[in-house]
Image (cartoon, grey):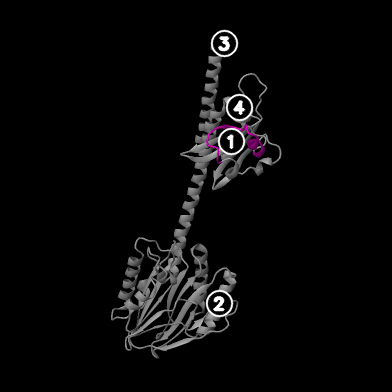
Amino acid sequence: MKENRASLKRLQLSNYKLKTLLNITQAINDNQSTEDLLKKYERILRSELNIGRVLLFSFNEKWECRLASGILGESFSKIKVERDLLQYTDISILSSTVDRKRLHGFDVIVPVYHKDIPLAYVLIGDIDEERDGISPTIKHLHFVQTLTNVIIVSIENKRLFKENLRQARIKRELELASKMQAMLIPDASTLPKNEKISVSVYYNPHFEVGGDYYDFLELSENEYGFCIADVSGKGISAAFLMSNFQASLRAMFSQDTNLSDLVYKLNHTVTLNAKGEKFITLFVGKYNYLTKVLTYINAGHNPPVMYDPQTKKISFLQDGCIGLGMLEKIPSIKVGEIKIAPTTKLLCYTDGLVETENFDNIEFGTKEIENCISNKKSIGKIVVDIVKKVENHKGEKTYFDDISLIGIEFL
């Protein structure tokens, strides 16, 4: 008779556990919230299994307490998973004085693992040791472990689903931002290729949006303005600052603009918008086809490379000032002025080009630029050659920065 009662009790307990797991699974399938799932979990452990104290830790980028039930105060806040729990890989009864001192008020640790990776830890306390037979807590430990696994995996799946939605939304926003930014940068097909001047460009943002910018403006029938710029840093904040900068430059740059005044005004704009957190390097030039004179200012930018086919001399355009936004007021500006010989070529670029590294951590540098520019090829072919060479240089290594190139041949 006793055996029959014991068998019946075991069957009832098994049916209860199976029914409980099915109910939890149904709640998960019904997409109940994390809060509701934790409430069900708490009710099962406290009310149905008569466990006095429950503390649940799970990992979500960092270890955090998901449930503290039957515990007075916040003494559990002193428990550090990395220090106190990670060494437990199996269900453990806290018997030693050391364990009980560190984890005061708890009797059992139930770890939850997936493929040798800890997902959660359940601390159980307030075991009724004076009752006849085995404590109810001890009898249900493996069930608690299974139930916790189901709950935690569900919560993690919910988090990952929300994170995937967030990433997809960010991706869509970045794609839109990329399209909008592309509209701010002149399309290669719109740049002049005539008897006065020929312009070729290359643009490769590191992310969907970038902090590089180039522009070419026809200021009058015989006068052209152009620039290349680079915001310190990468990503969305750099792109926003550069978009604002582009709008400011286009509004201020005209035939009557004095380059020094332009740079002073742009520095003021960048200082206000960046608030000292970023700066912009800029090379800006103005070329007059009738006088054949190029005036320019290099505001902390990589010096453009110029090749004079008459003298076969290569020079670097360095005259200028500090970068924009580095100081509230630029101390002084030196305006460069050059008489341009026919078929002179100029290559302006951002630092992403020359700082591209190969697997030996050697930078691309300017030597290949000098080699490519000092020949009779058209500026378009020279830009293509440089892009091919930097691709070969980096090999399978990824680019770490935006790359922009603007090549000009003065005819």
Residue at image point 58% right, 36% down: 122
* Quadrant for the C terminus in the image: bottom left
Sequence order check, earlier mark of 3 and 1? 3
Is disc 2 placed on a helix, strand or loop?
Answer: helix
Is disc 4 placed on a helix, strand or loop?
Answer: helix
Sequence order check, earlier mark of 2 and 1? 1
Q: Are circles 4 and 2 on residues that touch, CB within 8 Å?
A: no
Residue 377 position within the rendered picture, expressed as x and y whole percent measured from the top left: 28, 79
2 or 1: mark nearer the eye: 1
Residue furthest left as drawn = 376
Sequence order check, earlier mark of 3 and 2? 3
Q: Which mark is residue 267?
A: 2
Residue indicated by mark 4: 137
Residue at image point 69% right, 41% down: 75
Q: Is residue 100 magenta?
A: yes
Q: Is residue 73 left or right of residue 323?
A: right
Sequence order check, earlier mark of 4 and 1? 1
Residue indicated by mark 3: 2
Q: Nearer the viewer, residue 174 or 84?
A: 84
Q: Quadrant of residue 16?
A: top right
